[in-house]
Image: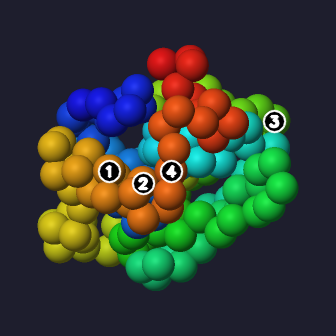
Amino acid sequence: MNLDGLSFPDDLWYAPAHNLWLREEPAGEVTLGLSAYGAALYGDIFAFTPKRVGTHIPVDRSFGVVEFAKAAASAKSPIAGTVTAHNEVLLQRPVLMTRDGYGEGWMIRMLPDDWATACQSLLQGEQAVAAFARQAQRDGFDPGDDSVQALKRQL
């Protein structure tokens, strides 16, 4: 799926209010990463500081801090769970979050408290893209403004 040149793979779950994607892994963990829309808003990312492995993260609580051009933001989890891994590569190359957000740029993995319930609050496919479109409108996101479209040129 696509929105203003930004890609949203169909096989992922999305939390538009958090600008994140989620993927259920075969062992029951869930991988979280920055969505293409989030990457376009942030532009180049200079640092990612995740919570430690073993930390329990409640819903809407921070699992790390993302530093970008002129600010820093707390990355808040749309689901509750325990951090099982963080992407060590991002500690050295945080720009991967915007350059390969759906691949090597993933942020953390966590073991969800209750995935069956948690995924009911997430979106997939056209519903997710429509929600990101509404979020973009609320944010005043201008798809023609290249300064906030760092990812768009690379897709």
Residue denoted by label 1: 133
Q: Position of residue 97 (x, y in %)?
A: 61, 38
Dividing the picture into quadrants, the one containing residue 148 is top right
Q: Residue at x 83, y 55 (%)?
A: 70
- Mark in front: 4 vs 3: 4
Viewer-side residue, 130 vs 107: 130
Residue denoted by label 4: 141
- Mark in front: 3 vs 1: 1
N-terminal of the pair, mark 2 or mark 4, is: 2
N-terminal of the pair, mark 3 or mark 1, is: 3
The numbered mark at residue 136 is 2
- What separation in Å lies between label 1 and label 2 (alpha carbons)? 5 Å
N-terminal of the pair, mark 4 or mark 1, is: 1
Left or right of 46 in this view: 78: left
Answer few, some or many: residues within 10 Å of disc 2's Cα (few below 14, many 20 plus, some between 14 and 19).
Answer: some
N-terminal of the pair, mark 4 or mark 3, is: 3
- Mark in front: 3 vs 2: 2
Q: Amino acid at mark 1?
A: Ala
* Local SS, label 1: helix
**Labelled pair 1, 2 in contact (Cβ < 8 Å):** yes
- What separation in Å lies between label 3 and label 2 (alpha carbons)? 30 Å
Q: Is residue 97 visible?
A: no
Q: Position of residue 118 (x, y in %)?
A: 24, 70
Q: Position of residue 53 (x, y in %)?
A: 62, 62
Answer few, some or many: residues within 10 Å of disc 1's Cα (few below 14, many 20 plus, some between 14 and 19).
Answer: some
Q: Is residue 2 visible?
A: yes
- What separation in Å lies between label 3 and label 1 (alpha carbons)? 32 Å
Left or right of 153 in this view: 71: right
Quadrant of the rendering where the N terminus is positioned: top left
Residue denoted by label 3: 92
Q: Amino acid at mark 2?
A: Ala
